[in-house]
Amino acid sequence: MKAAVFKHKGGDMEIVDIPIPEPKQGWVRIKVHSCGVCHSDNACKFGNLGNSYPRVPGHEVLGEIEKLGEGVDPSYYKIGQIVGIGWYGGNHCGKCRECLNNQWIFCKESLVCGIHYDGGYAEYMVTPSDSLAFVPNGMSAEETAPLLCAGITVFNSFRNQNIKVGSLVGVQGLGGLGHLAIQFCKKMGYEVIAMSSSSSKEQLARELGAAHYIDMSNDGWVNQMKEIGSVQCILLTAPSSKIIQSSLESLGINGKLVLLAILPEPFNTTSRSLLRGNKSIVGWTSGDSRDAQDTLEFANKNQIKAMIKTFPLEKVNEAFVKIADARFRHVIKIL
Ligand SMILES: [Zn+2]
Ligand SMILES: [Zn+2]
């Protein structure tokens, strides 16, 4: 089969011919249809989570079950079933404190797809069966793939913040995560403020469902936010450490700042900014396969779609290198 691999730390991907992998006990083989390109593929490229090389990246995988390993229940996992695999790559133990608390993603046995084992930039891959979410009928392979990381990240982080339906919610950044976050928050029943670093994306933000638009390059943007109302939550999808303090100030009483991306530098704030108004800053790691299932079903029922550009596997480096100017997600079309 053809696959794109990082052969060594820090290099580009190379297209190689390698044997089709066999699923071991509890694993399944997937015939890959498409795989979304994610900024976090850099973790594979640079070995941030200790992966070995060569390694096939790709953790927004959509494909069909093609072969079951020993011990996988054929009445539940059916050949031909369309499935998705995200950052959570399965293999949770089911016995540890994290598993018993339903936090599979934090189980020490859990694996990351495309990091700890070969991912979706290939014609076939193998994965633990508990990594799979079932894709509802009729969802497009290419438009759905980005929901498996970008989609879960925004939907699952936000639904766990317990924000009252109808509240004002900010979505900072209008890229791969942000354009999905606006759609999800709107369809979940919130009044969305799109927050961007320029005025250029206003029309798009409103088409996606934003009721308000804040151009953060204006000095008075914090006051503009306060004039709209009491903002209960801001999803920071593309933050820099410089905007943390002002974002905090723009929140209403009990407001939450949710960090969805890694900041290159530490940020500064003051205890007073948090204490005055019971505010908080929280982080959130995507979710597991059950969260992926919920994300897919919600997106399907509410017609939420990623805006994408597709590339063939041979052009995977181009898709990856140009991810910063992607409008909005790049997807490798394999089948
Ligand atoms: Zn990702
Ligand atoms: Zn566990």
Image (cartoon, grey):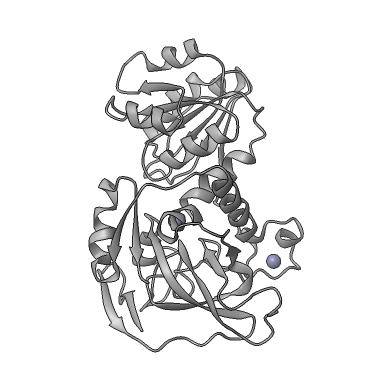
Point 55% across, 42% down: residue: 302
The C terminus appears in which quarter of the rendering? Answer: bottom left
Q: Is residue 53 above or below residue 304?
A: below
* Residue 313 pos. (x, y %): 29, 70
How many numbered discs? 0
Question: Residue at (40%, 64%) from the top-left corner?
Answer: 35
Residue 59: quarter of image = bottom left
In the image shown, does 292 or 274 lie closer to the viewer? Answer: 292
- Ligand 2 resides in the quarter of the picture at bottom right
Front residue of 187/18: it is 187
Q: Residue at x 71, y 77 (%)?
A: 75
Residue 284, can we see it? no
Is residue 288 visible from the viewing direction of this image? yes
Looking at the picture, how far across and down is residue 273, in whole percent? 53, 21
Residue 316 image offset from top left, x and y in percent = 28, 66
**Left of 111 or right of it: where is 327?**
left
Q: Residue at x 42, y 54 (%)?
A: 143
Of residues 37 and 10, the one drawn nearer to the viewer in this rendering: 37
Question: Residue 231: which quarter of the image?
Answer: top right
Residue 69 position within the rendered picture, expressed as x and y whole percent measured from the top left: 61, 85
